[in-house]
Image (cartoon, rainbow, N blue to C red):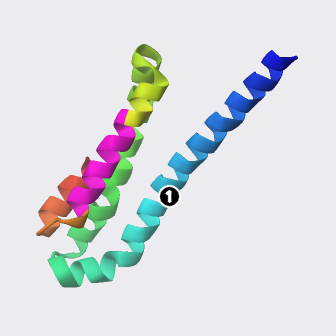
């Protein structure tokens, strides 16, 4: 009986963590989409640059989703999740400090 409760607790915890990660990804896109007028004013660039600002993150996320799942099976899901969270945090910091539109797009792709 206690093993079933422990499994349910672990499954609930995994659901909470993955939900927070999904929320972070959605929030990231929402914030950038909302900030596009300010990004254009501060960093310049044309409409195509603003499109790449949004699309760079989405394309990278979509392309690496299955590869990340396979790497998680191979090296451990927890380890890969923590590494991904660290890369996401570093890339977000780089995007926040981007001096120009090109470096912003590159940081968003990472």
87 in magenta: yes
Q: Indicate the position of residue 17 as horizontal and vertical percent values.
A: 57, 42
At 35% from the left and 77% from the top, the residue drawn is 35
* Left or right placement of residue 46 versus residue 51 in this view: left
Front position in the image: 87 or 68: 87
Determine if residue 64 is in view: no
Q: Indicate the position of residue 92 as horizontal and vertical percent values.
A: 30, 56
At 40% from the left and 35% from the top, the residue drawn is 82
Dominant SS type (magenta): helix
Name of the residue lying farthest toward the right: 1
Quarter of the image containing the N terminus? top right
Name of the residue lying farthest toward the front: 2
At 14% from the left and 60% from the top, the residue drawn is 103
* Left or right placement of residue 107 versus residue 57 in this view: left
Q: Indicate the position of residue 44 as horizontal and vertical percent values.
A: 15, 79
Q: Which residues are magenta?
A: 83-95
Q: Identify whether 20 is placed above or below 80.
A: below
13 in magenta: no
Q: Indicate the position of residue 11 as horizontal and vertical percent values.
A: 69, 30
Determine if residue 33 is in view: yes
Give the secondary structure at mark 1. Answer: helix
Front position in the image: 26 or 5: 5
Q: Identify whether 65 is placed above or below 50.
A: above
In the rendered image, which residue does mark 1 sit on?
26
Front position in the image: 85 or 50: 85
């Amino acid at each position: 009986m206690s093993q079933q409760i422990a499994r349910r607790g672990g499954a609930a915890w995994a659901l909470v963590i993955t939900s927070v990660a999904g929320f972070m990804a959605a929030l990231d896109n929402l914030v950038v989409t909302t900030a596009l007028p300010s990004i254009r004013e501060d960093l310049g660039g044309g409409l195509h640059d603003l499109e790449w600002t949004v699309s760079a993150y989405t394309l990278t996320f979509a392309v690496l989703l299955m590869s990340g799942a396979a790497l998680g099976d191979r090296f451990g899901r927890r380890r890969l999740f923590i590494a991904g969270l660290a890369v996401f945090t570093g890339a977000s910091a780089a995007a926040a400090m981007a001096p120009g539109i090109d470096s912003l797009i590159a940081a968003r792709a990472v």
